Amino acid sequence: MFATKPRIALVHDWLTGMRGGEKVLAALCQLYPDAPIWTLVYVRGSASPTIARHLIHTSLLQTMPRSGTLYRQYLPLFPLFAELHKADASQLIVSTSHAVAKSMVKRHSGARHICYIHTPMRYAWDLFEEYFGVERHGWFLSRCVYRPILSLIQRYDRATIGRVDLFVANSSFIAERVKRIYHRDAVVLPPPVAIDRFIALERAPEDWYLVVSALVPYKRVADAIHACHHLGRRLKVIGKGPEFDSLSQLANSLGAPIEMLGALDDEALADHYRRAKALLFPGIEDFGIVPLEAIAAGCPVIAYAHGGILDSMTSDTAVFYHQQTTEGLVDGITRFEQKPEAFQTDVMRAHASKFTEQAFIIAFAKIANDLLSQPATGALT
């Protein structure tokens, strides 16, 4: 146990926008307002003021050409950047990780490391084909270039597990993945959801569906486009990412009533939640903050029944479908349209209220204090 208030360092993979992981970091910044942040690369203006007011240390990746937009292209070098990027003599390291943040090297002999893990590297362990498969990159690149690189990254990922004293998973789905890949137990703590700006909205549903998502392969946004085209339903897609152009081309080629809106500010996003007929959620998500934002605004969810969504949604807030295909989503939409009145705004908002920022901060502080009260091993790994 530390006799004085411990020095704390926050570690995050990269700061290039405000997605779910960054919202967790923002809550931790409220809990630890004086803690510096260590991250691979930081795009100024991309993070919230809550994050940006902290002292932010970047790695060698920050100096690489076009690292702010092409940071994913430097994936083979992530372990090197992580090893060279060492936190100061902090006594408590808190990482939020879906890549290499969990690998932060301890400098203090009695330091503890809590990793709030969004997922073990999904493209290295479970979604290689979606990101680096033959269909996307051809046989040679997929099997002779990307496969060996990702195998080395897997070895590094496992080799640095011992640097973490306690894993905190964002859902039971991720806790199971941590157990399977890292052979470690994890405490489950749902991420914070800033629902206040949604709960106060007046619900005014219109005749169109909504997708809010990073436009990356595993989100399965194409399923929503195909399903809405098949049913002749209007769809609005909010989000940005490497698949924006290909999804836009798909929508145009189908001649479907689909709008690709790109990234929107918080006010416009909230307005779309309150006016959408329902949110479509076709991917397997680690947890799923977006569906909670939607139900806080009174917007029901139609979701594939797998992953973290099962921790956050119930039959009072969502229609689940069980086949992750266009046909499965079509079935989900059809069943929703048979009983849209079954979803009551007050009930959905009451459920969303269980996942507040304050609840997260209180629970995480207890987890950290409990760890710090235990004797340290003194090991540096």
Image (cartoon, rainbow, N blue to C red):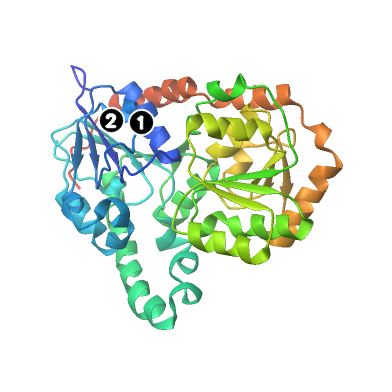
Toward the viewer: 261 or 110? 261
Q: Is residue 304 visible?
A: no
Q: Does residue 163 appear left or right of residue 86 in this picture?
A: right
Q: Residue at x 62, y 60 (%)?
A: 251
Is disc 2 surrounded by few (<14), some (14 to 19) or many (20+) residues within 10 Å?
some
Look at the image and tell me whether residue 202 can be seen.
yes
The picture places residue 311, in percent across and down from the top left corner, at 60, 38
The one of 66 and 71 positioned closer to us in this rendering: 66
Q: Residue at x 20, y 49 (%)?
A: 62
Circles 2 and 1, Cβ within 8 Å, touching? The answer is: yes
Say which element carries label 2.
Answer: helix
Label 1 Cα crowd, 10 Å radius (few <14 / some 14-19 / many 20+): some
Q: Dot 2 corresponds to which residue?
A: 52
Q: Is residue 365 above or below residue 149?
A: above
Q: Is residue 260 above or below residue 76?
A: above
Q: Which residue occupies 26% across, 57% down? A: 78
To which residue does mark 1 refer?
A: 48
The CA distance from mark 2 to mark 1 is: 6 Å
Secondary element at tag 1? loop
Locate residue 2, reporting x and y percent: 20, 21
Dot 2 amino acid type: Ala
Q: Amino acid at mark 1?
A: Ser
Q: Nearer the viewer, residue 196 or 146?
A: 196
Query: Which corner quadrant holds the N terminus?
Result: top left
Query: Residue 283: x and y, percent?
Result: 59, 53
